[in-house]
Image (tube, rainbow, N blue to C red):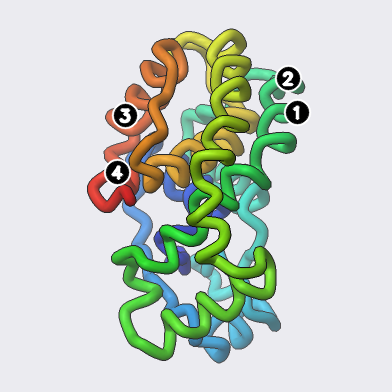
Amino acid sequence: MKLYIYQHCPFCLRVLLLRGLKKLDLPVQVVLENDVETPTRLVGRKKVPILQKADGSAMPESMDIVRYLDAQFAPPILTTAERPEIDAWSERASGLIFRLAVPRITRGDFAELATPEARAAYIEREIRAFGDLETLLAATPELLAELAPLLAELDAMIPAPDSEFGESDIRLFPLLVMLSIVKDVRLPPALATWYNALLERSGLDDFSAQAQ
């Protein structure tokens, strides 16, 4: 099997988290942002993550891949019911988190942006999605002020690090990884404990080393 990803992609981070927590020997290949041929050959369109299975077939969609890998390799770790309050928070906060993180990711050191052409393709894609990226960077103080009460709200509902783990946790974790590229974000105590425990257990690095 092989996993095709972008390093910065929150959907790819869902699969990478499960891979790390389960200690799976699953090779990873980073696809250049401007490589349309590879994902199209595998699943008919440009998207990641993609899991190429042992039988040669390919599976897109992050949560489908997460569920497949968790079921294939015992014991399962997705053992708790979904947490609707966490999912609702992720839904409400994701747009704000993307507006903070994306302009910084376009400047970051990620393997999928390793060529000028790949970085240009990514910047073009994000401008189409979010508008002028310099304007978003200039709005950082206002966006951080909007984020602060949301983080406090999440801190009050986050489970203990040793609680059972489920799909809501898989969906939340990548949003916090994206925030790690924003240098002035500080997670409140309970949330920081949960997040750092997952980083340690999974062996993943976040983006804090290149925070801007």
Compute the Cα span from label 3 to label 4: 17 Å
Q: Are marks 1 and 4 in contact (CB under 8 Å)?
A: no
Compute the Cα span from label 1 to label 4: 26 Å
Residue at point 71%, 29% (across, down): 87
Q: Earlier in the sequence, mark 4 or mark 2?
A: 2
Q: Earlier in the sequence, mark 1 or mark 3?
A: 1
Q: Residues within 10 Å of mark 3 (few under 14, many from 20)?
A: few
Q: Residues within 10 Å of mark 4 (few under 14, many from 20)?
A: some
Q: Amino acid at mark 2?
A: Glu
Residue at point 66%, 58% (across, down): 61
Compute the Cα span from label 4 to label 2: 27 Å
Q: Secondary structure at mark 1?
A: helix
Can residue 64 be seen here? yes
Residue at point 38%, 41% (across, down): 180
Q: Which residue is mark 1?
A: 88
The quarter holding residue 84 reads top right
Q: Are marks 3 and 2 in contact (CB under 8 Å)?
A: no
Q: In the image, which disc is placed on residue 208?
A: 4
Q: Which residue is mark 2?
A: 85
Q: Residues within 10 Å of mark 1 (few under 14, many from 20)?
A: few
Q: Position of residue 148 (x, y in %)?
A: 55, 25
Q: Which residue is mark 3?
A: 201
Of the pair 63 and 210, the residue shown nearer to us: 210
Compute the Cα span from label 1 to label 2: 5 Å
Q: Earlier in the sequence, mark 1 or mark 4?
A: 1
Q: Are marks 1 and 2 in contact (CB under 8 Å)?
A: yes
The quarter holding residue 8 reads bottom left
Q: Secondary structure at mark 2?
A: helix
